[in-house]
Image (tube, helix red, strand yellow):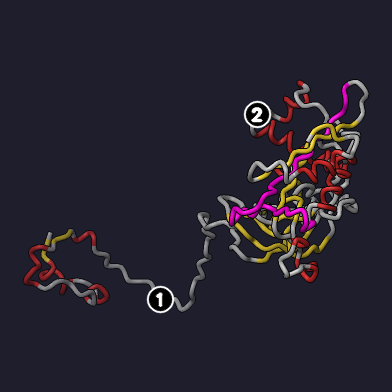
Amino acid sequence: MGTISNLTNTFPLHIRKFKFPSSSSSSSYRFPLSTLSCSTPEPESNTTTSISQTPNSNATSYFPKRGQTLELLCESLAFKGKGLCKVTDTGFVVMCDRALPGERFIGRITRKKGNYAEAAKLQTLTPPFDTVDAPCVYVPHCGGCKTQNLAYHAQVKAKEEQVRELIIHVGRFSQKELELHGIMKPIVPCDIQFNYRNKMEFSFGPYKWLPKESMHERNDDGGSENYALGLHVPGYFDKIINVDKCLLQTDPANKVLAAIQECWRDPQLGFSPYNVHSHVGFLKHLMLRSGRDVMTGLPEIMVNFVTSSYKPELLKVLVDKVSAFPEVVGT
């Protein structure tokens, strides 16, 4: 062992160039001679070796931002008829209302969730599979029949796939068990696709909701012509689409609805629709329940008016109007 100050003169030239600590503190720096290499250093090379950057395995996955516009492809239908879509070339899942299987479209991200996002459809690039013309005029805006423009056999297939996914992922059955033990039977289509609902509830409102392309039809005078009786716009409790006929309920129920629509806006009757913001108004809801006589099989209708206060004398005109229909057996 030796101190640094006594050994520096015996080192080769390339070792002497190293700046050692001063001799005043040399006593605290001792190391074995074997740790010093006296071999001649390799000449420096003028070439530079490129080091490839290894991809970071912990890099964050693709996640769109709110308001971002993307090209999406709808692969299937999910719960409540929403389209299960994928972002092109990423596989990121986006749920979109009124998107149908096979449809490629431009969508805007409206909400971000934990591992997926929600979008609104802006423009269709490629039409979906198995589309048909929707018989109801309110389909583009009403929330009752979002997939009415999808062929019925495709709707049945989509519903069967949804049930199968629930049994496998929630019920924890394997695909093999479903087929081997017959746990899931094939879906049975319904013979009646319309006019099957036995109950419908319509809401009264002070203003008709109109789409942008129909805003010129609005009367800004605030009269009874703007009153609405119909169904809610999806996602809004205070916006009502005026509905004159609904294909979900029976034909006798639609006749009763049409008769009420003809007269309830008459200013001389003094009816006022209930305003959910100011809590002012009389008529709140109209409920129509359809059934059949157990003996004759003839259709029967029960009509209920839901009001903000008990004033049966005000409803007498409407009650007399609907009671003229032979199918109406109770009001």
Residue topped by disc 2 = 171
Residue 130 drawn above or below residue 293: below
The residue lying at 88 percent from left, 49 percent from top is 130
Q: Is residue 291 magenta?
A: yes
For the residue pair 281 and 160, the one nearer the viewer reads as: 281
Residue 299 drawn above or below residue 311: above
**Identity, as a three-letter code, of the amino acid under mark 2:** Gly
Left or right, residue 178 beside residue 54: right
The residue lying at 87 percent from left, 22 percent from top is 294
The segment highlighted magenta reads 266-294
Q: Gap in Å between the C-alphas at discs 2 and 1?
A: 68 Å
Q: Which mark is residue 44?
A: 1
Looking at the rendered image, the disc whose residue lies closer to the viewer, 2 or 1, is 2
Res 89 seen here: no
The residue lying at 78 percent from left, 62 percent from top is 225
Total numbered labels: 2
